[in-house]
Image (tube, grey):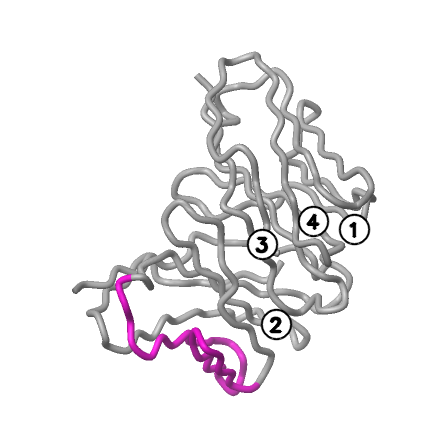
Amino acid sequence: DAKTTQPNSMESNEEEPVHLPCNHSTISGTDYIHWYRQLPSQGPEYVIHGLTSNVNNRMASLAIAEDRKSSTLILHRATLRDAAVYYCILRESGGSNYKLTFGKGTLLTVNP
Amino acid sequence: DTGVSQDPRHKITKRGQNVTFRCDPISEHNRLYWYRQTLGQGPEFLTYFQNEAQLEKSRLLSDRFSAERPKGSFSTLEIQRTEQGDSAMYLCASSWTAIANYGYTFGSGTRLTVV
C-alpha cells in the first residue's frame, strides 16, 4: 500500500481555518486520497475524498497538489468539536480498494 | 437507519475466557469490515465480508479469532482463549460495493480489556 506522511500533531484556535497537510509522494495514478477523522472514544468518520481536483463538502475542503504528491485538508472555521485525530489514506481504485490502511494521523487540538 | 451498531461498547474479561462481539451494519451495505485499534495507533484491518462470504483475513487474525456473517446481515467476531495482548478497540465498518470509492461508515467500537 502507498504510504502517507502527516505531522503528529497540530494546534488551532477556535473559529480560525486549519490546514492539515499530507504527503504521499509514491501515490499511483489511480489512488484516491481519503480523509477520515476520529473523535475521542468514537470510530473513524469519513470526511472527504478526491482524485485530482479540489473537492468541497459540508465538512471540509480537500486541496490536491497538481502532481498529486501532497494534499491538504482544510477546515474553514475550526470548532471545539473538530478536535480529533485526522487520517490521510490512499485508497486503490482497483481490486483491493476495500482495505483502508491507517497511519497514526494528526492529532488536532482546538483552543477556545 | 442510525448507522453501524456494535455491542457491547465495553467488555472486561479474564485471560483465557472467550468473548464475542456483534456488529449490525447499515442495512443496504453488502460489505462489512473488522478493524482493531490499540492505544495511540490507527486502526488495523482484520477481515472483510462481501455479503456472507469472508473474502480476506489479515495475518493479525490468529487461529483464536473467528468472524462470521450469517445471511449477509449482522456479523460476529469471536476471540477464544483471550490474552492480554488482545486488549484493544474492535471496530466494525460497512460500505456499499457500488460506491466503493466513497467512505466507510464505522461503528463506535467495542473496547476489550483482558485482565
Residue range in magenta is: A53-80
Image coordinates of residue A100 in percent, x first then y, are 60, 56
Q: Residue at x 70, y 66 (%)?
A: B100
Chain label for disc 1: B
The picture places residue B56, in percent across and down from the top left corner, at 75, 44
On whether disc 1 and disc 4 are found on a single subunit, the reply is yes
**Same chain assignment for discs 3 and 2:** no
x and y, in percent, of residue B13 in the image: 49, 18
First in sequence, mark 3 or 1: give its number: 3
Give the number of callouts.
Answer: 4
- The amino acid beneath tag 1 is Gln
Q: Secondary structure at mark 3?
A: loop
Q: Residue at x 67, y 27 (%)?
A: B65
- Residue indicated by mark 3: B3
Looking at the rendered structure, the kind of residue marked 3 is Gly
Residue placed at 27% from the left, 63% from the top?
A10
What label sits on residue A17 in the rendered view? none
Reading the image, the residue beneath label 4 is B32
Labelled disc at residue A32: 2
**Do tag 3 and tag 1 residues touch (Cβ < 8 Å)?**
no
Residue A16 lies, with reference to residue B75, above or below; the image says below
Pick whichever of labels 3 and 4 is earlier in the sequence. 3
Q: Which residue is mark 1?
A: B50
Is the residue marked by circle 3 packed among few (<14), some (14-19), or many (20+) residues within 10 Å?
A: some
Q: Amino acid at mark 4?
A: Leu
